[in-house]
Amino acid sequence: MAIKLKKSYKFALRSSLVITILITAVFVGFHMDVDHMDWPHTLLFALICFTICFAIIQIRVERFIYRRIKRIYDDVSLLESSSFSSKPVTTDMRTLVEEIEKFAEGKKIEIDTLKIREEYRKDFLGNVSHELKTPLFTVQGYILTLLDGAMKDKKLRKKYLQRANKGVERLIYIVKDLDLITKLEAGELKLEREDFDIIELIQNTFELLEMKAAKKEISLTFDMEYPNPVYVNGDKEKIQQVISNLLVNSIKYGLPKGTTEVSVENLIKNKVIVRVTDNGGGIQKQHIPRLFERFYRVDQSGSRNEGGSGLGLSIVKHIVEAHGEKIYVESEVDVGSEFSFTLEKASTPPVSEKTSNKETKSTLDSN
């Protein structure tokens, strides 16, 4: 069975062999009469020389590498000191270079990740502080005005208290949305899955947002007539929140007298895709990757004229992903945007619907 030499001995073996050959050659050179050479003693001399050279080189190189390389590792925290006690220190330079390059690359990736996270943290803190301080300062301003004497005027008192209440409601709205996202990320919010008609759900959402859309003269419509129900499986309340948030977002940033269109299409055998399309101003490409971040705004001017918590799209993304589905966005400036997400089809229509269909059929047959 062939003996595989460790890489840590290769350097010492080769170096010892070269030194032994050179010394032996010099030793033989001093004896001019090669025919009368004492070859057994010469070979013994070569063997002893090789052994001594190998031992010295191996010990010295191991100590050199262990002390210096370990110090480098400790300084940059690439390895724990226990790594050296459990494994022999290699003297193979190629292995050492590859190992150091590997750790250096890992550290570079880690540093780049930390930089991205730090940038995100700064943006997040800046956005959340802006979102919170606006209603806080509003509430504080009205209360201070009342304390300065405005409370004596009944009409002014009621007016300012109502405005302060709106500021508090906005704060509560932001906190509730943040709490919802936190629960979704932590997996603490359980989805109550059921089979339901997505067409009916969208129609109900249209009715809830009808007045909001009418203010900007934006029409909410389907892409076509859907005479038959389309049953999907999911948390009905959360999916309605997804559709509502997408529609509200479309109304907020859509052009006056525009259109927001919703379509439901078969994607694959057991999936449907819901599309929300508008003909608004569109979104620039550089903003699209960050649309679903908390508090991220395409408008970087700091304007908050449209109101809201700035968490709508982030909530949409988390709810869709909690269902094990995906959300997509496509947009073109001055053309419009399309947000779409997938849902699982219901395996069978709800029991109540089956019963209703049977009763209808029985009535028709009896007639």
Image (spheres, rainbow, N blue to C red):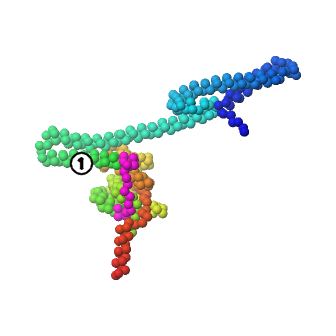
Quadrant for the C terminus, please.
Answer: bottom left
Residue 356 percent across, percent down from the top left? 35, 71
Whether residue 200 appears in magenta in the rendering, the answer is: yes
168 relative to 115, above or below: below
Q: Position of residue 269 (x, y in %)?
A: 48, 63
Is residue 297 in view from this perspective?
Answer: no
Q: Which quarter of the picture shows residue 355?
A: bottom left
Q: Is residue 317 above or below residue 220?
A: above
In this rendered view, identify the residue nearer to me: 252 or 328: 328
Most extreme residue toward the bottom is: 367
Quarter where residue 271 is shown: bottom left
Residue 97 falls left or right of residue 3: left
Q: Is residue 318 magenta?
A: no
- Residue at image position (54%, 26%) is 71
Residue that appears at 40% across and 62% down: 232
Residue 54 point in image, percent of width and height: 69, 25
Residue type at mark 1: give it.
Answer: Lys
Image side of residue 44 versus residue 230, left or right: right
Q: Residue at x 33, y 54 (%)?
A: 248
Question: Can residue 164 be seen from the camera position used here?
Answer: yes
> What residue did someone put label 1 on?
166
For the residue pair 308 and 354, the one nearer the viewer reads as 354
Q: Nearer the viewer, residue 5 or 11?
A: 5
In-front residue for pair 4/242: 4
Quarter containing the N terminus: top right
In the image, farthest residue toward the front: 1
Q: Which secondary structure, mark 1? A: helix
Q: Which residues are magenta?
A: 181-201
Residue, x 34% and y 46% (percent of image)?
178
Residue 3: percent from the left, percent from the top? Answer: 70, 36
**Within 10 Å of the Cα at label 1, are there few (<14), some (14-19), or many (20+) other Cα atoms?**
some
